[in-house]
Amino acid sequence: MRIVVDLNKCQGYAQCVPLAPQVLRLLGEEALTYDPNPDDEQRRRVLRAAAACPVQAILVETRIPDDADPVT
Amino acid sequence: MRTASLVADLVETFRAEGRIVIVGASLAGLRAAEALRERGFHGSLTLIGDEPHEPYDRPPLSKQVLQGWVGADHTALPRMGAVDAEWRLGVAATGLDRVNRRVLLATGDTVPYDRLLITTGVRARPWPNPAEGALRGVFTVRTREDAAGLQAALNADPKRVLVVGSGFIGSELASVCRERGVPVTVAERGGGPLIGPLGGVIGDIAARMQRGAGVDLRTGVSVRSLDGDSDGRVRRACFSDGTTLDVDVVVASLGSIRNVEWLQGAGLAAGFWGVGCDAGCRAFDINGVVTDNIFVAGDVARQPHVLYEYQFISMEHWDNAVCGAQVAANNMISLETERRPHLPLPSFWSAQFGVNIKGVGVCSFGDEIAFTQGCPEDYRFAAVYGRRGRIVGAVTFDHGKWLPYYAAMIERSAPFPPPPPGYDRPADPAPVPARFPDPRVPTGIPDVVLTGHDPTSRGAEFH
C-alpha cells in the first residue's frame, strides 16, 4: 500500500505512532518518519493511524486506480 | 453577452474533448493530472516523464531511504484518484513548438496539445568536474537511482563520507551518516550550514548541532578536486586550504538546476530561475506577455507573490508542487472568473540530528531575526524574521506546533518584533541581523529564491 504524510501539516502529536509502529515512527521529540509503501498487512493499522491524526496529515491510497501501472 | 457565452461554450467543449499534455511526471505532474480529472476534464491527457518510474516521493530519499529503513523503490506516491492518462515514461521532452502546439520527444515523436502544463522540476547540480564526478563513490541525491546507489555505499561501511554543501539535503545526509555511525566530513564554502535558507544566526546553531553530533564540519573551504584510484573509485579530496582527506564516498549537495533546456527557442520566459508565470500559473513569454495555453507548476515555476512585494519566487517545496499543481489544473479548465491564484505561504520541514526543523514564509526576505520562544542552546526554539518592521518568515526547532501561530502573523504582516509570549520566553529576544549571504555568491543556494523583479536583478545567468 502507499501513503504519504504531509509533514507541513504534521504537528508531531504522534497519535499515529502507537497505532502503526512498524510504519510510523518518531525521530527525537517531534519529527515523524514513515515507510511510504508499507506491506498490505499493515493496512488496517495504517487506516486507524490516519483516522487518529488530529490534523489529518496522513494520506492513504484507498484503492489502486485502474491505470496505476503506467505503460512506458 | 454573446461573446461571453461563446467563451463559456469553448471552455465546456475543451473540458469534454480538449487535449492536455503534462511534461514532468513527478509530484506536481501527478497531482495536476488527478485534479484535472476531479474537476471534470474528460478530454485526452498525456503525462511525459524522463524517468522510467511512475511518480514517486523524493523527500524520503535523503532520510528514510538512506537510513536504510526503506528501499529506494518504496516511495511511490499514493494515487488520490484515477487519472486515465497516456503515460510516456522514460522519454524526455526535447523541444516545444508553440506555433503548431506540439511537444517534441527524445524518440523523435511529437505530442500535440491544446493546453500544456510544464512540471519538469529541477535536477541535482552535478559535481563540476565531469571526470571526477564519474568516479565510483561520487553521488548526488535527487532520483531513486541516486538514493539506491548511495544507500548501497553506506551499507558497505565506508571509512569516511564527504558531503559537499550544507543546505537542507547536505545537512540531512550528514545526520544520516552520524545516525549510522559513519564518520562524515561536511565541506561548506560559506559560513555555515543552512545559511542560504535561514541565515547566519541559525547557521551558527546548526553548526553547533552538527559538531555536537560528531560531524567534522569545515566551513569557508571548498573542495578543489577529487582523486580516484586505478579502479576509478574515489579515494581522496583536496580542499582549498591545501589539506587533503581520505574518503570513499563523496556526496555533492550543491543545489539544483532547473529543467528548462528543452524550452530553448520556444520564446517562453524560461531561464536560470525557472519558467516565469503569473500567480495563476500561466506562463509568460519572453517579453513578459502572459500565454493562454501554457501553464507552469512546481519547482520549475517562478511566480510573483503579493506578500513579498510581488517579487518572483522560485520554490523547491513539496507544498508548492502540490498546491501549484492543483491551482494550475483548475485554471487550465476554468473561465476567467473561476481562476484561482497560487499564493502559498511557503512551508518546509527537515529532520536532522533528531531535531524537527520547520519553517513558514520566506525567511531570506528578512534581514533581521528575533528569537521568540524556547532556548536556542537546546535546539528548541521559535524565531521570526523581519523586514522593515513586519514579519516575513519564521523557523522552529522542535517547536512545530507553534508554526500556525506565526503563519497567521506573516499572512497579516504583523509587526516585527512581535510582542513577547506569556511564557517560554527566550533569554535574549532582541532582534539581530539575520546574516543572509549575498544571493549572487554561488554557495548556500537556498531552496526558496527571491529572484527579483526583473531577470537581471539577482545576477542570474540566462541561457
Image (cartoon, grey):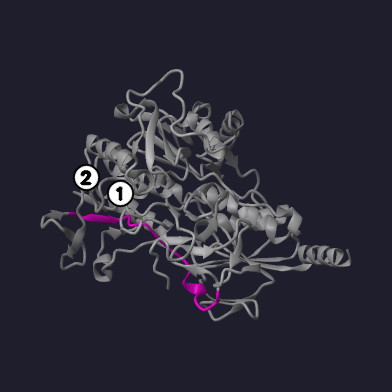
Give the residues in magenta: B247-267
Q: Amino acid at mark 2?
A: Leu
Q: Chain of mark 2?
A: B
Name the side, left or right, on which B194 lies relative to A66: left
Looking at the image, residue B198 lies above or below residue B456:
above
Viewport quadrant of the C terminus of chain B: bottom left
Q: Amino acid at mark 1?
A: Ser
Would residue A34 be visible to someone looking at this image?
no
Q: Nearer the viewer, residue B327 or B386?
A: B386
Q: Residue at x 28, y 70 (%)?
A: B130
Please, what secondary structure does the residue beneath circle 1 have? Answer: loop
Q: Is residue B171 magenta?
A: no
- Residue neighbourhood size for the residue with mark 2, other residues' Cα within 10 Å, grouped as few (<14), some (14–19), many (≥20): many
Name the side, left or right, on which B38 lies relative to B175: right
Name the side, left or right, on which B288 lies relative to B234: right
| Res B349 label | none
Measured as percent of width and height from the top left, residue B208 is found at 25, 36
Measured as percent of width and height from the top left, residue B198 is found at 37, 43
Measured as percent of width and height from the top left, residue B286 is found at 54, 72
Q: Which residue is mark 1?
A: B166
| Res B217 label | 2
User: Where is residue B55, by image quadrant?
Assistant: bottom right
Q: Nearer the viewer, residue B353 or B457?
A: B457
> Do tag 2 and tag 1 residues touch (Cβ < 8 Å)?
yes
Please, what secondary structure does the residue beneath circle 2 have? Answer: strand
Q: Is residue B249 magenta?
A: yes
Looking at the image, residue B271 lies above or below residue B310:
below
Q: Residue at x 47, y 38 (%)?
A: B391
